[in-house]
Amino acid sequence: MTSTLDSLNFLRRPLPSSSSVLSGIGVGSSSSTASSILYGASTEEKIIIDIGTHSLRAGFSGDYAPIHSSTLKTKFTFSSSGIITRTVGHTLHNTVVESEEELEMRLVEHFRDVYRRDLLVDARTRKVAIVESALAPVRLRLAVARVLLGNLRVPQLSFYPASVAALMTCGSVQAGLVIDCGHRTVSVTPVYEARALPPYATSTPLAGLTLFDNLRGLLQNYARFIPASGNGDDVECHDLLSDSVVTHIMTKMLLASPIALPEKMRANLGVVGRNDCVLSDELVSFYESSSTCTGAVTRLTIDTERYGRGLLVFPSWIRERAAEPLFSGDPAADHQSIPDAVMQCIGRVPVDTRRALIANVLVVGGVADLPGFRHRLLHDIVARLHRDSRWSALAADAALADESQAFAPSDRSWIGTSLAVAAKIGTVELSRDDFDGCTLPDWTAISQ
């Protein structure tokens, strides 16, 4: 009864005037009230921004999930002569950025859109916490700082290490290996006593973009398309698959096979579509016999520009094995796998930290959202530890840091930073007045 009366009393409250709402989103006065009205946030809270090579997440500190999460896209095309033209829109990671001015203009476009459509606050009234990787390019860090402090007039920036922030979501765990599976790079960063150790970090380029390219190559070689308007005859898929179709299959239909590839077959493995790589008949036969999917064939209705709507038919083992280069490496391009990058990191760190680190393996990033990915990765790490006499004693201690998977792997770094800001855990800060446009504080050099 009390809750019902409270609800009725809330409905009787006068609505805020349009001028107060407009001033909160940066139209008119610089005072901000839209966040308090719409989200119940206070002006003491910071805005958390996690920007990667493929996606951006933004929201308010203290929240359990970001309000905004999207792929980095742009509506403009920049020419070498400085001419800007409007286009339909394409992702930033497929765009070659030729100058710092162009990079900053793209960031301004996206940040303004996030503030206007999702955050609904005036950028000049809220401090911002940036989630950044230890391997983030200095050029990108400077561009983000110039855009936020110079263009959007943010009062202050705080920089939080993504690896430490992600480990905070596991509770009292203060040591572990944080494997960040991003779009272009997978980084393995050791964290000991709640401090990141960047000198011992390792990385591999076999990441989300590799998964995308390998899936496209497998579909082009082994899938068939049956037009709905035809007589039932199928056609090849070489030029029919759009990026949106491949992305839909990658995000909605893929999983990681629990069965590892035999050692003798890894020499023939590669990213299909790169370096003229094709799968051998022996490898395809193993994929078919070891498939755990319920059906041998998967069917999906798609739209194409040439034939219109139709049915895409492909072997189900593609759904399981598209991510195989991430676990087994790419010998053709001399790129190590993610488990090999973990082994390289274990060999670099001090001896007395190895057991504590391998006991808490935390897998984060968008690729880690793939069902079965985390457990397959741990299985391959344990197998490599057993094979090497130097690390075999550590195999029994290897474990995932969060078996319950309370948070989505792709959101863990953002959520950890949200917790750190809400708990008032300090870090490197830079005010608008102290920024000279060229120098940024480096959190990796903190001595206290």
Image (tube, rainbow, N blue to C red):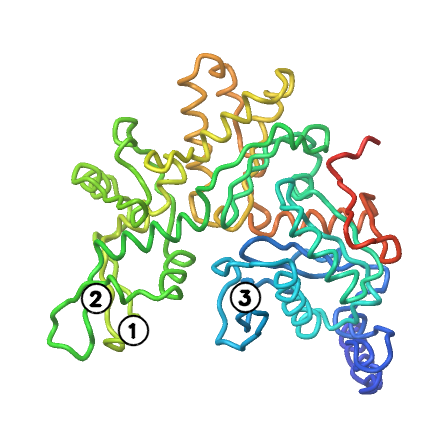
Q: Position of residue 35 (x, y in %)?
A: 78, 70
Q: Label 2 neighbourhood size at 10 Å, few (<14), some (14-19), many (20+)?
A: many
Q: Where is residue 219 in the image (x, y as percent from the top left)?
A: 27, 56
Q: Is residue 159 above or below residue 349?
A: below
Within the image, what quadrant is residue 241 found in? Answer: bottom left
What separation in Å lies between label 3 and label 1 (alpha carbons)?
33 Å
Disc on res. 304: 1
Q: Label 1 neighbourhood size at 10 Å, few (<14), some (14-19), many (20+)?
A: some
Q: Mark 2 or mark 3, which is nearer the start of the sequence?
A: 3
Tell me the residue at 28%/65% (across/down). 300
Left or right: 391 with respect to 291?
right
What separation in Å lies between label 3 and label 2 (alpha carbons)?
40 Å
Quarter of the rendering occupied by the N terminus:
bottom right
Q: Which residue carries the number 2 mark? A: 225
Circles 1 and 2, Cβ within 8 Å, touching? The answer is: yes
Left or right: 231 with respect to 206?
left
Disc on res. 191: none
Dot 3 falls on a residue whose secondary structure is loop
> Which dot, 3 or 1, sits closer to the camera?
3
What separation in Å lies between label 1 and label 2 (alpha carbons)?
10 Å
Amino acid type shown at disc 2: Phe
Q: Which residue carries the number 3 mark? A: 80
Q: Nearer the viewer, residue 231 or 62?
A: 231
Tell me the residue at 70%/61% (across/down). 59
Q: Label 3 neighbourhood size at 10 Å, few (<14), some (14-19), many (20+)?
A: few
Amino acid type shown at disc 3: Ser
Q: Is residue 7 above or below residue 270?
A: below
> Which dot, 3 or 2, sits closer to the camera?
3
Amino acid type shown at disc 1: Thr
